Image (cartoon, rainbow, N blue to C red):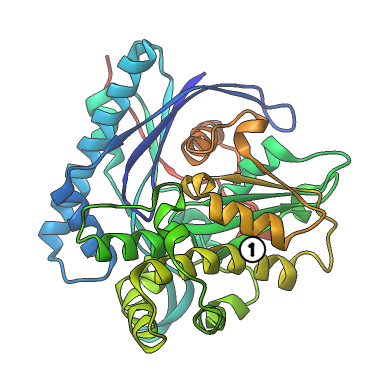
Amino acid sequence: MLVLGMMSGTSADGIDVALARISGAPPSLSAKLLGHTSVKFPDALRKEILRVAEQQPISAGALSQLNFRLGGLFADAALAACRKFRVSPKRISLIGSHGQTIFHQGRPVPYFGAPTASTLQIGEPSVIAARTGITSVGDFRPADMALGGQGAPLVPYVDYLLYRHARLGRISLNLGGIANITVLPRAAKPQQVFAFDTGPANMLIDALVSQFTRGRLRFDKNAQLAAQGHSNPALLDKLLRDPYLKIAPPKSTGREYYGHAYVRKILALGRRHRAKPNDLIRAVTIFTALSVVDALNRFVLRETKIDQLIVSGGGAHNPLILAQLSAALPGIEVLPSSRLGVPKDAKEAFAFALLAYETFHQRSANLPSATGARGPAILGKISYAPPR
């Protein structure tokens, strides 16, 4: 099957699209990435997505409109990708769309008399299927949560298919808005794989860059601003006391925790420690790397021998993060996912192509050891294309 995978992360930069050729079934499933591209959101719409994801008020009607509008944009992104890859939409068998997360509460909290966990990804798959004429799978996370899992992370199933190795212990690290890891012990069986969100990745860096440049820049390209900053050990030490880092996995996080309120706390910390803008950007960049290192030392390396750290996502382009990871993890080779055949920016979109393929074939694709679910779940909801 030719399958398109689509993803928009917590930074809401836009829609990543990957084209994959997939055949077979685990453990001999074959998947090849044929191309990847990305489409930016209009600025005004991105601001609205981020506003809603920060839990600012929105009416039911406006949320419904946003869901369908994003469905249209995801459909447009799929068709634009077909044009770019020079493949007719009629040749595409399936689309897997993660959608846009606007709320994620992985652990149950009291709600109207009962502990409740929930998640909400929008970008209506029925609109994608109707506009493209391609059967579409969306809403992947709730099936895992219905079985008591956190609904995240879901990419570990794909990491297992792509990166398990008979002789090497590996960790797949994705640096999107949030940083998450998949731990793959040497010759791992599925139940030995575990994964969790380690903390922030690009989310805090991007927020500070946008704040200090008044929206002129969205991210710190090649860590140029961080490189101009000075180190502030006292400030960094304060950041590394973040309570989330101490929570044992399985765990997941997002904009609900590392969003606007968290950035305000960092700005206040910066004023208290007399940090200039670039000093603060540098501190948060190093905090991103060291929070990953902290997670590995706290929850992984005591039990599991790791030989390689495979890095993907937007943060894989940040040389300061990569340098900090290499310096703090002696004996572990830090390498980009592109060295193993999946470009750094295509990994998650590629993953949702694979997850959709498994859903279409009625096979489970969560790893309970990663999400905390009681058992396997067939992920996602299928929106069939209109009859031709």
Front residue of 92 and 263: 263
Residue type (three-letter) at the residue carrying disc 1: Arg
Front residue of 304 and 232: 232
Q: SS at mark 1?
A: loop
Q: Position of residue 360 (x, y in %)?
A: 50, 32
Quarter placement of the C terminus: top left
Q: Is 266 above or below relative to 333?
A: below
* Relative side of 188 to 237, left or right: right
Q: Is 161 above or below relative to 50?
A: above
Front residue of 308 and 371: 308
Q: Is 251 above or below relative to 99?
A: below
Q: Can residue 152 be seen from the camera position used here? A: no
* Relative side of 175 to 12, left or right: right
Residue 116 falls in which quadrant of the image? bottom left
Residue 363 falls in which quadrant of the image? top right
* Relative side of 175 to 73, left or right: right
**Given the current orientation, which residue lies at the most extreme bottom position?**
272
For label 1, the crowd category at 10 Å Cα-Cα, with few meaning under 14, some 14 to 19 and many 20 or more, is some
The residue sitting at 74% across, 32% down in the picture is 27
Q: Which residue is mark 1?
A: 374
Front residue of 357 and 57: 57
Q: Position of residue 203 (x, y in %)?
A: 40, 61
Residue 383 falls in which quadrant of the image? top left
The residue sitting at 42% across, 86% down in the picture is 273
Q: Position of residue 129 (x, y in %)?
A: 29, 30
Q: Can residue 20 be seen from the camera position used here? A: yes
